Image (cartoon, helix red, strand yellow):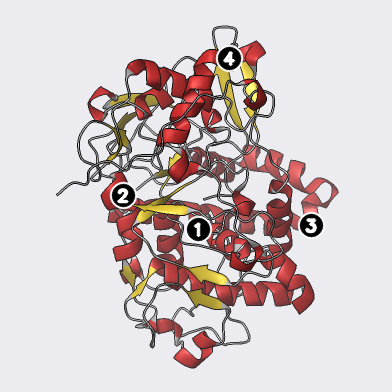
Amino acid sequence: AELSAPPALIEVGFMERLLRIDGGAAMHSLASTVPTLRGGAFGQALGMSMAFTYYNPLKFRRFAEQVLGERYEQDRAQLRHDFKQVLDRLLGTAYNDWHRGLYPTEEGFGRTDAFGRIANSVFGDAIDPANYRVANAPVSYPHLWDIWKFDWVQWNGSAMQPMARNIGEALGVGATLRLLHENGQPVAEAERYASGVRVRDLHRLETTLMQLAPPRWPEDVLGAIDLTQASLGRALYKENCAHCHDARPKPVDKRFAAERDPEWRMKVIPTSFVGTDPTTADNIADHRFDLTRLGWTQDELDRLDVQLYGAPAGPLDLASLSSAKGLAYITAYVEERAYRDAGIDEVERAEFDGFGLPIGVQELRGYKARPLDGIWATPPFLHNGSVPTLFQLLSPVAERQKQFWVGSREYDPQHVGIRTERFDGGFLLDTAITGNSNRGHEFRAGCRGNGVIGRALAPHERWALVEYLKVLGDPRFEPRLEELPAPPHNPGPSCP
């Protein structure tokens, strides 16, 4: 989820110097389920802590006194009731996820199956248990700088409007939503779609994130830049990488939001070409959900501020709706209700939506190739975090680690990525498991496609590219690099 990552911390060397990467990919373990007895996730720790607090009178009294202060006597009983409701919901979710086997691919540190968890929460928990789907495609928390400039967000480029995206993510991590009565009938229209979503806070988060800038390589901590190597790396970048990863500002008349300046066109690369693990994109494209219990009509759906890109015209089949489309309409209803409850008028609403954008949806079997400014601060790499360093990402798949330990904040400034040695409390990421594949995005001799995106890079070329990716877009370094001639991008021979 793109707004769920707190600042990332990187440890460097034995002196344990810490770098704070604002908007970086946090290395925490969020899952609330209990797939192993090893534990270690935040959700598991929170549930156990709450259980010990609730069932131990001394602990609960201490907790209640800290929370209530002078109102301890009057409000203690209500606090205990509310506390138990949250605890029951957390434990119920954990049990449901575990006994249904919804998350067979362990997420570990720095990853979660965001779309899968949102879909199970909204379509399964809130509508019909028959809508639960196995979510076996963890993705890394993406870094957050520059995302306000993207025309499409999410790993697969499926969402457009910032507020709708953020509402969906809030629902996925536990914002309350009551759509049906206990008897399965829809809640009365006047009461429907009330939720725990706080749109003013979401808007404040979104506008604050617009101030984020890509982090700059700290030479005093991570080492000096070799300008000769970086100069060669820039030429190699222009030849091999820029055609997918360079920011592409749109002219005003081509933007989805004319006031957004710049607005970058995000290139979504099909999984059939880039070859990275397709499970996330396939699940989003293939999973279907039955939303008929909500009683929607096509006329009322047509009145919502939802635009489906690339979808065939005609009425929707509510008995078999994709996750992206289903979430678009549910978030549209929740958004309408949340704006009304918060007293937000039509003029203010356009600002809160984000540049007046509609709730746009597209469904592509691919992943977006975002600009690489600050990429050095975002390991591990690929959408599922299956490659620990940039040097390995530029190497053939046969030279990438098949297993490595995740969870340490120790940084490898030479290969540019995380240290991968075993350590107490670490998570072993096995790339042979569904959703964890490290194949694709490969520079290798031969025809292109099916995972091979460029020519083979000699080791010295990989090192030069890694050196440049430390400073790409950095105004302190770009003007100091030598302008070397770069061959034009060569798409290479296509696979038969």
C-alpha gap between disc 4 and disc 2: 40 Å
Mark sitting on residue 225:
4
387 left or right, relative to 204: left
Q: Position of residue 215 (x, y in %)?
A: 64, 31
Residue 37 higher or lower than 370, as above or below: above
Q: Position of residue 344 (x, y in %)?
A: 77, 73
**Which residue is nearer to you in this view: 174 or 314?**
314
| Residue drawn where x is 63% and y is 58% of the image | 82
147 left or right, relative to 106: right
Q: Nearer the viewer, mark 1 or mark 3?
A: 1
Tell me whether the residue at label 2 lies in contact with that at label 3, contact meaning CB atoms closer than 8 angstroms.
no
Type of amino acid under label 1: Gly
Q: Position of residue 438 (x, y in %)?
A: 30, 35
C-alpha gap between disc 2 and disc 3: 47 Å
**Which residue is nearer to you in this view: 269 or 456?**
456
Q: Which residue is mark 1?
A: 172
Q: Work out whether mark 1 precedes mark 3 in sequence or the reverse, and give the earlier one.
A: 3
Asked whether the viewer can see residue 441, the reply is: yes
Type of amino acid under label 4: Ile
Residue 286 higher or lower than 2, as above or below: below
Q: Secondary structure at mark 2?
A: loop
C-alpha gap between disc 4 and disc 3: 63 Å
Asked whether the viewer can see residue 410, the reply is: no
**Which residue is nearer to you in this view: 419 or 64?**
419
Q: Work out whether mark 4 precedes mark 1 in sequence or the reverse, and give the earlier one.
A: 1
Q: Which residue is mark 3?
A: 74
